[in-house]
Amino acid sequence: MNKYIVLIAVVLLTINTFSQKKKSVKAKKVEFTETTNIKASKIKSQDRAGTCWDYATTSFVETEAMRLGKKEFDLSEMFTVRYDYVTKAEYYIKVHGKGNFSAGGQAHDMMRVVKEHGVVPENIYHGINYGDTIHRHGELLDGLKGFLKGVNKVSDQKMTTAWLPAVNGILDAYLGKKIEKFNYNGKTYTPKEFLNQEIGVNPDDYVEITSYTDAPFYSQYILRIPDNWSYNYYYNVSLGDFMEIMNNSLKNGYSFVFDGDVSEPGFNHKKALAVLPLSTEKENMYFKAGLKEVKVTQEMRQKTFNSRETTDDHLMHITGMAKDQTGKIYYKTKNSWGDSNDYGGYLFMSEEYVKLKTVAIMVHKDAIPPEILKKLNIQ
């Protein structure tokens, strides 16, 4: 009789354990209620171009044009890339090949091209001139790097004047020649005229902001990341003010560019979610409502940046905020990996994820709260 009692107890315990595990597996899926949603242009895919910085910042400029009362535009990313590769090549040669020559870049790279050369619509400059239907820059990038490495050897002890026209020749072959003038809706524009008359965005109105303790807060310093190849200056603020700038921007109708880390196990574009799980649960359990997350501090930001646990992997465009069914805050983020995920190409990054994994942002200076503007001495 005792054997049967023990057997029944074991069976009941097993059933109870199984039901608990089963209940855990069936944890509620995260459901989002958007609290702020800024209109953005359509989702696009960077394909295999490696130029996320350009896609994110171009989307940002398109949204800024709408905020300024303009219509929705589809601007050419490759027009910007075409000019950026030339500037990057010039810099690479000037530093004798010791700099970073890659597809990567930052939001300021797009704004620099916009300021110097303007913009054009996508249908004017597709930037695919190599017998394909999507952007593939592997061969282009390898060819440019190989050529520039050869130039850097200076075998004849003196550089010629031919290398820069040669770079332009390679870019012409792969992406297409520079656009000097074009017709749009029956009117002829230069790219700068199109920027000023149709888009209305002033590149000088935008600033990049970060939050690290290796420089004084409320000062400017060179953010030392590989893709800041031109050594641009960023404004440095405390983590509290960093988040306040983001929140104030979105609440007042200003989107911003996100530069940060997407290599965490809790980042899943397909499931449209990015979180910082506190526990070591199986990966498929990260994506549930009410997930307990790491509480991020300023010190943690610096530690993970120094250890390279946080790197500038990817740039995206943040266009809103949302809450899940437990009240947790998320940032609605427009990615450039196409529209094949659960939210048509958008994803939602949790507040803690954004606190830790945002390396820097670009935002209109008018979106910064007045008291922070004053501390930064931004006019």
Image (tube, grey):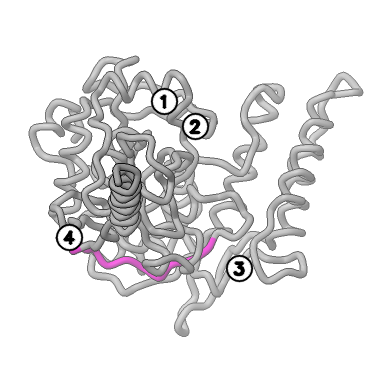
Determine the residue positioned at 22% across, 28% down: 239
| Residue at the disc numbered 2 | 228
| Spot occupied by residue 225 in the image (x, y as percentages of width and height) | 48, 27
Amino acid type at circle 4 is: Thr
Amino acid type at circle 1 is: Leu
| Residue at the disc numbered 3 | 126
Dot 2 falls on a residue whose secondary structure is loop
Which numbered marker is on residue 36?
4
Q: Earlier in the sequence, mark 2 or mark 1?
A: 1
Q: Nearer the viewer, mark 3 or mark 4?
A: 4
Q: Nearer the viewer, residue 334 or 228?
A: 334
What's the distance in space between the residues labelled 1 and 4, CA to CA? 30 Å
- Looking at the image, residue 23 lies above or below residue 72: above
What's the distance in space between the residues labelled 1 and 3, CA to CA? 32 Å
Residue 200 visible in rendering: yes
Mark 4 packing: few (<14 Cα in 10 Å), some, or many (20+)? Answer: some
- Is 125 included in the stretch rendered in magenta? no
Q: Nearer the viewer, mark 1 or mark 4?
A: 4
Q: Earlier in the sequence, mark 4 or mark 2?
A: 4
What's the distance in space between the residues labelled 3 and 4, CA to CA? 32 Å
Q: Quadrant of residue 214?
A: top left
Determine the residue positioned at 32% across, 66% down: 40
| Spot occupied by residue 159 in the image (x, y as percentages of width and height) | 81, 27
What's the distance in space between the residues labelled 2 and 3, CA to CA? 26 Å
Which numbered marker is on residue 186?
none
Q: Which residues are magenta?
A: 33-45
Mark 2 packing: few (<14 Cα in 10 Å), some, or many (20+)? Answer: some
Amino acid type at circle 2 is: Asn
Dot 4 falls on a residue whose secondary structure is strand
Determine the residue positioned at 29% across, 42% down: 2
| Spot occupied by residue 289 in the image (x, y as percentages of width and height) | 24, 54
